Image (tube, rainbow, N blue to C red):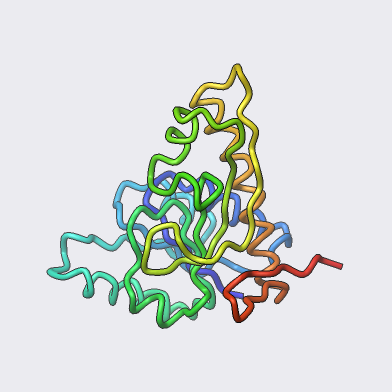
Amino acid sequence: MRLGVLISGSGTNLQAIIDACAAGEIDAEVSVVISDKEAAYGLERARKAGIDAVWLDRSAYDQPSLFTAAILETLVSRGVDVVVMAGYMRLLGRAVLETYPDRVVNLHPALLPSFPGASAIHDAFTFGVKVTGVTVHLANEVFDSGPIIAQEPVRIQEDDTVETLEAKIHEVEHRLYSDTLSAIADGRVEIGEDRVVHITPKV
């Protein structure tokens, strides 16, 4: 399975995926990493791993559809099978979603449908919930609303701060995302007619 990973930042989840592929924990390879930010450190992580790293400058395209077309061309030209959003902070355009139906995967640092949006960790902490977590889901045309593939809870302790909670969330993200991509690569993820996702346990 060939992965195309979209990033906007430092790429810690990207690194976890690269490492898991290299260790044989995911039966896949990262074919290309695409960033909408030139300074995203994730591009350097890709280069160090010998992976094609591509920066697409959003300001160079007059219309969002043209930027989406550039992303799609980059993915298709590298033979990508599954698109992985790993800290990509933009809504992905329809052309990519239609070309990769149910093959665009996203990660969210909360238990969706609770606390959608870019500030999920902070929102959960300040709301005072005692349990938050991590969600892996299929992306669609609405932020954080696609079918849920996997979730894992993270308990908020009395002595936690936003920073310590963020660290715990990231630790779970790295493991859960790799485990989910492994299940996808192994063909153990099925989407029912009701759009509920089921994962067959690994034998």
Taking the image as shown, residue 44 lies to the left or right of residue 167, namely left
Q: Residue at x 53, y 45 (%)?
A: 110
Q: Residue at x 50, y 60 (%)?
A: 106
Q: Is residue 42 above or below residue 68?
A: above
Image quadrant where one finds the N terminus: bottom right
Counting from the top left corner in percent of width and height, residue 158 is at 61, 19
* Viewer-side residue, 132 vs 170: 132
Q: Is residue 186 above or below residue 19?
A: below
Q: Quadrant of residue 177?
A: bottom right
Counting from the top left corner in percent of width and height, residue 154 is at 64, 37
Q: Residue at x 12, y 69 (%)?
A: 62
Counting from the top left corner in percent of width and height, residue 105 is at 52, 65
Q: Quadrant of residue 18?
A: bottom right
Q: Residue furthest top?
A: 159
Q: Quadrant of residue 131?
A: top right
Figure label count: 0
Q: Is residue 116 above or below residue 55?
A: above
Taking the image as shown, residue 104 lies to the left or right of residue 201, namely left
Counting from the top left corner in percent of width and height, residue 151 is at 63, 52
Q: Residue furthest left?
A: 62
Q: Is residue 169 above or below residue 198?
A: above
Image quadrant where one finds the C terminus: bottom right
